Amino acid sequence: MSDTSGTQVIQPPGHTLPIGKYSPAVSVPLGNGRRMVFVSGQVSSDAEGTVIGPGDATVQTETVFRLLSEVLKKAGGELADLVSVVIYLSDMADFAAVSAVRNRVLSDPAPSSTLVEVSRLAIAEHLVEISGVAVVEERR
C-alpha cells in the first residue's frame, strides 16, 4: 500500500464538478519543494455544463487551455509548468486549428505532446479534450 500523505485534490471554483468518481486534478509531492500535478481531461464547458463554442475547434481549444491554466493556478502553477499534454480530437480535420492554439499558448520548452483522434468524446458537441501533467513549486 502506498503512502498518499500530501496528495491534494484540486477543484477550482467555477469549474464543472466531476460526474463520476475522479478528481479534476491531483497534486502529489515530489520532494525538493516540487509537486507533480495530474490534470484530468478538460473540455469546453462552463460551470453548468453548457458547451462553449459548439462547432468551433479554435474557441473550444482556447477555452480548454484557459481551464487548464485555472486548474494549474489553483495548484500553484501555470501552463509553462506543463511537462506533458494529451489532446483528444473527435475529428482530425480540426488538427490545424487546435495545433495553432497549442503553439500560441504553450511556451518553450514545450511539453511532450500526444494528439489522437477518437470516435467521440463523452459529450458529442465537444471537439477537443486535453489532459496534462505539470511540475510546480511547492506553495509556501
Image (cartoon, helix red, strand yellow):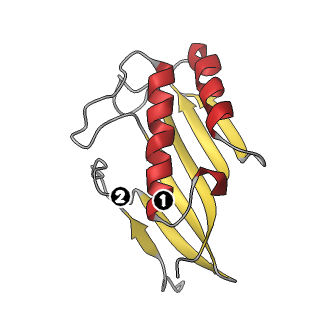
Q: Give the labeled residue for mark 2.
A: 12
Closest to the observer, 132 or 59? 59
N-term mark: 2 or 1: 2
Residue 62: x, y in percent?
49, 32
Residue 104: x, y in percent?
65, 32
Quadrant of the rendered image containing residue 67:
top left
Say whether residue 18 is left or right of residue 74.
left
Which type of secondary structure does the marked residue at label 1 adopt? helix
Q: Residue at x 53, y 18 (%)?
A: 91
Q: Give the labeled residue for mark 1.
A: 73
- Between disc 2 and disc 1, the foreground one is 1
Q: Residue at x 31, y 49 (%)?
A: 15
Name the amino acid type tagged 2.
Pro
Q: How many angstroms separate mark 2 from mark 1 (CA)? A: 9 Å
Q: Residue at x 29, y 47 (%)?
A: 16
Q: Residues within 10 Å of mark 2 (few under 14, many from 20)?
A: some
Name the amino acid type tagged 1.
Lys
Q: Residue at x 30, y 52 (%)?
A: 18
Contact between marks 2 and 1 (CB within 8 A): the answer is: yes
Above or below, comparing residue 68 to residue 21 in the picture: above
